[in-house]
Image (tube, helix red, strand yellow):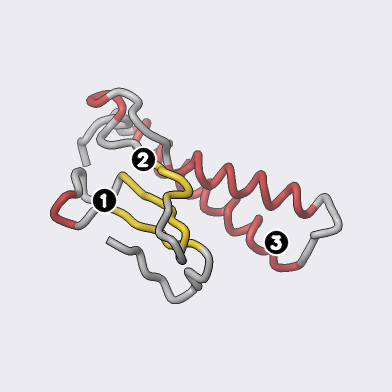
Amino acid sequence: MEVINGLCTQKYTKVLCENKEEQRFNAPHHFEVVNAETSKLVEDINFQEGPIKENGINGVCNEDLILMVLTRLQSFQNSEYSSRENAVAITKLEESLMWLRKRTLDREARGVDGTSVV
């Protein structure tokens, strides 16, 4: 199914993921980025499906992709492509990593990190 978000133009690429009925563990795990004109696959991304302690490492984590984008934007900021918008995006990505880290620390403190225990 095509992922639609009003902030993304989908002018050059489109993002696809599995339908709700196909999803396991309450979220999509498989994404494809395709050329908007030709529908040719550009990249295939698989997220961790299920808790690591119960399913092993089988995909990327949210933090992995945020770190990739953060690193990319920081590189732009250290070049002639520096901008206010990049700086704000970097701050928000760092905040996202902070809150995800807080979630992990809370789960570790409760002894449920890496499991399906709520």
Q: Are marks 1 and 3 in contact (CB under 8 Å)?
A: no
Report x, y in % for residue 81.
Answer: 80, 59
Residue identified by numbered label 1: 27
The residue under label 3 is: 86
Q: Place residue 2 in its image quadrant.
A: bottom left
Q: Earlier in the sequence, mark 2 or mark 3?
A: 2
Label 1: state its secondary structure: loop
Q: Is residue 8 visible?
A: no
The quadrant of the picture occupied by the C terminus is top left
N-terminal of the pair, mark 1 or mark 2, is: 1
Residue type at the position of mark 3: Asn
Residue placed under numbered mark 2 in the picture: 47
Q: Residue furthest bottom?
A: 6
Q: For marks 1 and 2, give the CA distance.
A: 10 Å
Q: Amino acid at mark 1?
A: Ala
**CB atoms of marks 1 and 2 within 8 Å:** yes
Give me the residue at 80% from left, 60% from top: 82
Q: Residues within 10 Å of mark 2 (few under 14, many from 20)?
A: some
Q: Residues within 10 Å of mark 1 (few under 14, many from 20)?
A: some
Distance, label 1 to label 3, CA atoms, is: 28 Å
Give above or below for 50 relative to 80.
Answer: above
